[in-house]
Image (cartoon, helix red, strand yellow):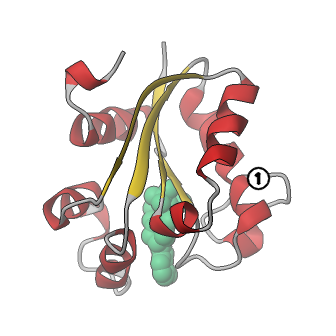
Amino acid sequence: NERTFIMVKPDGVQRGVVGDVIHRFEQRGYKLVALKMLQAPRALLESHYEEHKGKKFYEILLAYIGSGPVVAMVWEGLNAVSVGRKMLGATDPAKSEPGTIRGDFGIVTGRNIVHGSDSETSAQREIALWFKPDEIS
Ligand code: ATP
């Protein structure tokens, strides 16, 4: 069964949308198989965002995601990765359709509320980074 890594970023946690994000995935029919709240250490964020290393927003991005606790989750079900991305909306919330998480809660890319894996390969990589095997049911 396909799994995806979904994370509520610090702005989403501060604004109290964790419950809404969970509710949307439950309502859609996905199964929650892992969840934790943590202040992500720098090394974990460097690994998570290694594809962006060297880009001009890289340090801003790491400071943003490290600015407070995040809620990391693994959701399981049919096409979890691609449907999950649709549920999040476009990276730039200004371009996200209303009805998506970013389209309902965000306006700027630098504070875009949630993360979701963009492929099955990155989902597997990200799940292994954020969770130990025995933390996933
Ligand atoms: P995520 O990986 O968080 O789901 P994404 O895959 O939609 O987002 P990416 O292009 O991989 O988008 O960028 C990763 C994250 O980096 C974005 O979600 C956003 O928080 C941040 N980001 C991307 N581009 C910029 C930018 N130009 N300025 C500030 N932050 C940015």
In the displayed structure image, the side of residue 54 where residue 99 appears, left or right:
right
Q: Is residue 47 above or below residue 111?
A: above
Residue 99's spot in the image, x, y percent?
A: 84, 52
Farthest bottom residue in view:
56
In the rendered image of this protein, does residue 94 appear above or below residue 74?
below
Give the quarter of the image for residue 95: bottom right
Q: Is residue 25 left or right of residue 52?
A: right
Specify whether tag 1 is near ligand 1 (CB below 8 Å). no
Q: Nearer the viewer, residue 19 or 75?
A: 19
**In terms of depth relative to the viewer, which is nearer, 12 or 81?**
12
Relative height, residue 74 to residue 77 (above, below): below
Numbered circles on residues, count:
1
The C terminus, quarter of image: top left
Q: Image quarter for residue 39?
A: bottom left
Q: SS at mark 1?
A: loop
Crowding around mark 1 (Cα neighbors within 10 Å: few <14, some 14 to 19, many 20+) is some
Locate residue 115, reporting x and y percent.
50, 54
Which residue occupies the foreground of this view, 73 or 125?
Answer: 73
The residue under the point 24% across, 79% down is: 54
Q: Position of residue 76 (x, y in %)?
A: 51, 21
1 left or right, relative to 91: left
Relative image position of residue 17 (x, y in whole percent): 64, 56
Q: What residue would you read off at disc 1?
A: 100
Residue 68 horizontal side relative to residue 114, left or right: left
Q: Residue furthest left?
A: 43
Which residue occupies 69% across, 36% down?
Answer: 23
Amino acid on which disc 1 is placed: Thr
